[in-house]
Image (cartoon, grey):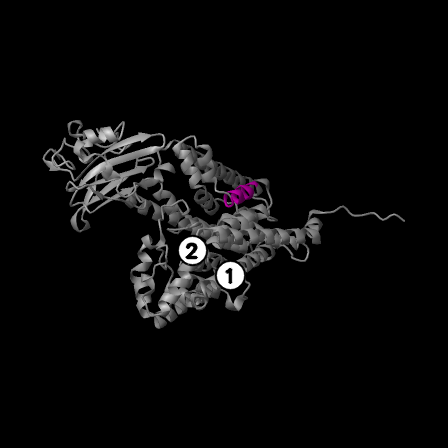
Amino acid sequence: MTSVQEPQTAASAWSRPAVRRLAVAGFAVAASVSCLLVLRSAADDQLADLRVYWGAVRWAAHGLPLYEFRADNGDPFTYPPFASLLLAPIGRLPFVAAGIVWTVISLAAIVALGRLVAVKALATPAATRPAVPWLVALGVLVSAPGQSNIHFGQVSLLLVLACLADGLGVTGPRWRGLLIGVAAAVKLTPLLFIGYLLVSGQRRAAARAGTAFAAATALAWLLDPTDSRQFWTSAVFATDRIGDITALGNQSVNGMMLRAGLPTTVVFTTWLATAGALVAAAMWRARRLHRDGQEGHAIVLVGCATVAASPVSWTHHQFWTLLAAMLLLASTGTTRRVAGAVLLVLMTLNVGTIIAAVGAPTPGAGYLADNVRALATCLVCTTALLAATSRQGQAQPDPATARRRTLARRGLVSAVAATFALFLVLPVPTRGGMTITPAPAGAAATHAHDSWPTCEPAWACRIGGELYPINYGASWSDDGVTVLGLAGADITRIDYVPAPGRKPVTIRLDQTGHGDQAFQFAAGDTTYAQLLVYGADNQPLGDYGGKLPGRMTAEPHHRFGLTRTHCHAAIRAAVPSSGCP
């Protein structure tokens, strides 16, 4: 008798052992390649953050001040003192052994995260779809946050795993909130999850989380009062310890605004308002998700709010946006699935670098590409993409409500489209404008000093009775700007700032043998650049970047530069097409 086979469903296809074996093999290959890339990276970049953890705990073990530690690459320890207590065991190992152990733990955490997302957040029964956890883990590993975490030996992945496991109830109702509190004591951004527990009515879990945070902080203060006092009174406020927060890796709202060329005071107030609005929107939607039983979606949404609102969100912090992409991919509805696929691509590929390689049509388009992850995270926080999944199985809204929702969606889409269109034409700083290349030692002084006779002394001229401490000319081309100039003997430092808020680069000053100093550097777009000059005792003398190309059309020449009659002949000779006004 001929048997009739049932049609193979999508679920049965995913549950086939061959698919699971293929997913496991894919993860193993990706893990091996990731480890090989770490080994092939530059020595000072290899497991750079783990080197900070390892070196800092060994430093502190000898009784030295924790927050005065600097790794070989200059990076300090930036976490609360409790973190150093938890990280103390790795300091007892040789660094190679610590690196191996840490990498194995990180890979195991990715596997655990994949299972947690598949079984708990996606509600995928492991018995019927055993390949899904491994596919999720593979997606996490090959993503930009996953690769950054493995490459630098970061702790961010472990904190994400702890917060997600706690939020999904893995620890049980009796211990709910403890992992979140401990994670917040290691890194402050998980404190936002305590706020979520409060607004969603989970007051006991919020109390446990707050108690765990306070207890961990108090324990660190008891065991290390000096470092605790320094962290909570000064180091916690020093954002310059975190690195160049205007770098493209910082995909927070704050980083995006700093890269827009806005004054730092404007950025601070705008960031506070925007971050507050993002957090409020995410909390409101997360509360609704919790009430609808979508706890995994709620936790991920709050995590996205921590990424967007934090002053600093490096690539290895952005796991929450990646998890949002996976939740959207697993949801129903074409719009959400397409949004999830696009978001997954953005969190895996460096779109900004790709656009820069092919050439952005406008500076605004390049700016959008460089900040696309921050913008995408903001959209997740403010739109109903994740919240929409909670309406499955619910009664359809009445016509009036449906009409209001349609109008709201259209208004949001129009606002987003208008914002993107505005950025396309805005004269924002370009990626090239963020580059600065100081000249090698002695290069500036090699130019003929004898041909700088117009002004006496050669490094300054009196304009309207005011003596200017530096004089320079600028030559620009499609590749950027070259600046050559002289400074007085009492000038101690010249800093080039590509745009307000960007990390300054100190320009080398070469003694010329004529009682003054020469300087030279090459830069990208200088429209937003500043040239900050410092005198004796590092006293700031002002911004003398008015002659830089781009600023010349927007600012009066006499404030920062020299008139045409005072322009040095040597600058015009040494730098063709000089920018002297």
- Which residue is identified by label 2? 48
Q: Amino acid at mark 1?
A: Ile
| Quadrant hosting residue 152 | bottom left
Q: Secondary structure at mark 1?
A: helix
Q: Amino acid at mark 2?
A: Ala
Q: Earlier in the sequence, mark 2 or mark 1?
A: 2
**Image x and y of residue 489, in percent:** 16, 44
Q: Are marks 2 and 1 in contact (CB under 8 Å)?
A: no
Taking the spot 59% from the left edge, 42% from the top edge, the residue there is 333
Principal SS element in the magenta part?
A: helix
Q: Is 347 left or right of 532, judged from the image as shown? A: right
Taking the spot 54% from the left edge, 59% from the top edge, the residue there is 109
- Which residue is identified by label 1? 100
Q: Is residue 579 visible?
A: no
Taking the spot 49% from the left edge, 48% from the top edge, the residue there is 144
**Image x and y of residue 218, in percent:** 37, 70
Quadrant location of the C terminus in the rendered image: top left
Specify few, some or many for label 2: CA neighbours under 10 Å numbering under 14, 14-19, or 20 or more.
many
**Highlighted range, magenta:** 338-348
Q: Is 255 left or right of 234, judged from the image as shown? A: right
Of the numbered discs in the image, which one, if any, rests on residue 341? none
